[in-house]
Amino acid sequence: MNTIEQKLQILDYTFNSYIKTASFENNIQQPLTEKQFDIYRSIDKQLNYISSFGPNQTTAEFVSVKGNWVINKYGLRPLEKSQRDFVTSEYLTLPNSSTWVKEETAQDEIKLIKLAPLFKTNKNGVLIINIPMVSLTNLIYKQAESNPIYIYNKDGTLIYQSNKEVKKSKSTKDVFNEISKDNSQTGIKEMNTVDGKYKFAYSKSPYNGWVYYTEINKADIATAMKPTIISIFIMSLSMLILTCIIAYLCSDYFSRPLRDLLMFFPKGQKGVYKDEFELIGQSFRKVIDHNQLLNDIVTSQAEKLKTLFMLNLFRGRISEMEVKEKLQDFKYPTNWCHFFVLTIQIDGLDQSKYTKKDEDVLLFAINKIVSEMVSSEERLTPTVIDSNVQATILLCPDIDSNQWIPTINQHAESIQNRVKDEFNLSISIGISSPYQKLTECHQALEQGMDALKYRLKVGKGSIVFYDSIAAIYNNKIRTFFPKKLENQLFDVIKKGDNEKSIEILHLLLLELFNSKNPHELEVNIMRFINDLMGLMQILGMETIILEDHKTLYGAISKMRTSEEIELFVKNKIMSPMIQTIKERTNSQYKTISDEIVHIIQKEFDTDLTLEKIAMRLHYNPNYLSSIFKKEFNQSFSEYLALYRYNMAKKWLLETNLPVKEIAEKLQYKNSQNFIRSFRKYEGTTPGKFREQHRFDSISF
């Protein structure tokens, strides 16, 4: 059975893989003619190649009822009406997409019928695999010639007999009924017949339900029993000799172990102890101590393996089969119905005695607290992920997961209070939706992280269930960006008014944090930071460099509260900008480059050239060009074009000026030149840019 079905299963699975491909489904839908020779040749080559995996002389036919063609060993041909009627009535009506068939008109072969497309209700194609009976005969062992092999399908129909010259001593129906009564996969049955007792051995296939059986010849049984009888005799004789040897050695049994043990001890130690028993006892105690040490090492390694398993689980790197094996190996609880992922983050270290370097140690301490406060029957191993988040899988034994929510909330509050008491730290906790499969841990972890992001809305020390905010995340309504407040803030920054800028910044962030969706809040914050950096570029200021070479975007993305973001923007970005502007104002444009920039910002909408500025400042144009290039790492014309481009964007978004009028204000000779220049910077025309972004600029 194994020999035959190995070939059949490989053939079946290989054809399954083929008919699942997109090219197969595409080909079966369309008519083929001699003009599509490449398609025909590809299909024919694939059918011949896959057929080679089956028994010898296996062939395959590909029938497209919709395309009205057939490909077989005779080539590509139109589907005749009789063939079409036969395929439609006999094959397309089969209850299963894959069926083994033996037809009365073709007793010398069996067929595997596959309906296509495989996973669709409407079937319009058939793949027919023909396997000659002679090829099955070649797979049967030679010794089966005296005792023929019979194969029945699950309906009791004889589909194969290895030796047709041997007459069966029982009818097919009686044999099949006798085997069907037994639930065993394999066995030996005995039946009473007119000619005497009749024995046969059988095996049921889990693959296709076929039943294999062969008659047992009495002479063969006697021949097979001879080695057994001889073996029993030899074994009995060996046991007798072994018993005699054991009896002989019993007299020396008690003293020999002591002598063997003493051989392993140094001779000098024997005089230290009263007798050999004390020496052996002390040695055993040392062995026990060493064994305990080894057990401690193994336990430590087991905890590390559990942590590694949890990390791989949270990252979606473990299959369902591996999960079952690891749960059994690590002796985790199995009597649960759902699980939640509880994620913990520290709200901030700015107002505590700890520094950023202590965050990893604090998270591991919190991880230990979770292990102590939640019993091992209610969780899997708590784990620290990416030195940023602590995550724990909480197991829910109830079928109704909502009944477990109060318990989870109680655990979360207890953990918060414990961390507050021991470290004087505020932590926030996010809790995912309930899941049933541990392979979905990475999705539950993402939900826990999304729940933590909502802390930007509700503040520090939050406990947020993802289910309570899922509707907010799924809400696709677009929020407005407070562009007017941003423009007011930028105007105040340009004037160097620090107090007024702090006031407007606070109002602007309040508007941003009114966004209900945390994802949209992140986008709006990043947009605001991007606009701030654009203002810095327009003012000719250097990019701000943070500690550890972090970018502004990276630093903002890791902040967890609105207060933290406001302090960062005020102290790290806005204050340095205002200070720089004040220094420039107080020095009254002490450098020539600043004077040029000041002229550009005031007179960008005039016919401005470096030669005209040189005449006003009484300098050589080449000299001004070189110092401007050295100061700003770009030429005068590039800076002027960029400034006009930014002003063009501002007018497009904030005014209703026509594109032609904007081009004239920016000193373009015609609007087409302006459009080409704008497309070079933005990748789109001014009109399309206004349509795409005008909605963003509307604020309340």
Image: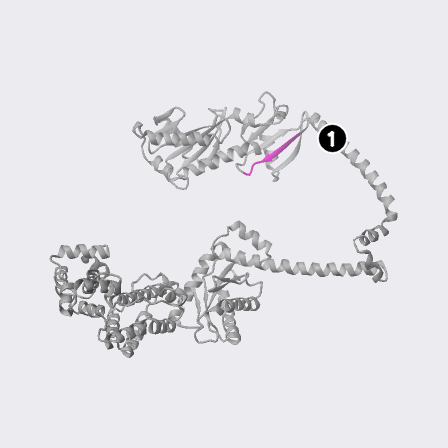
Direction right: furthest residue? 251
Numbered disc 1: secondary structure? helix
Q: Quadrant of residue 196?
A: top right
Asked if 333 appears above or below 160 in the picture, the reply is below
The percent position of residue 125, horizontal first and vertical second, equals: 38, 34
Q: Quadrant of residue 624?
A: bottom left
The percent position of residue 131, horizontal first and vertical second, equals: 49, 28
Residue beneath the point at 50% across and 59% down: 338
Three-letter amino acid code of the residue under disc 1 = Pro
Q: Which residue corresponds to mark 1?
A: 227
* Residue 400 seen: no
Direction top: furthest residue? 165
Tell whether 360 sits left or right of 144.
left
Tell whether 589 sits left or right of 338.
left
Tell whether 245 sits left or right of 604.
right
The percent position of residue 123, horizontal first and vertical second, equals: 38, 37
Q: Which residues are magenta?
A: 199-206
Residue beneath the point at 16% across and 67% down: 619
Mark 1 closeness class: few <14, some 14–19, many ≥20 residues within 10 Å: few
Q: Which residue is more in the foreground, 621 or 52?
A: 621
| Quadrant location, the C terminus | bottom left
Residue beneath the point at 18% across and 65% down: 651
* Residue 234 seen: yes
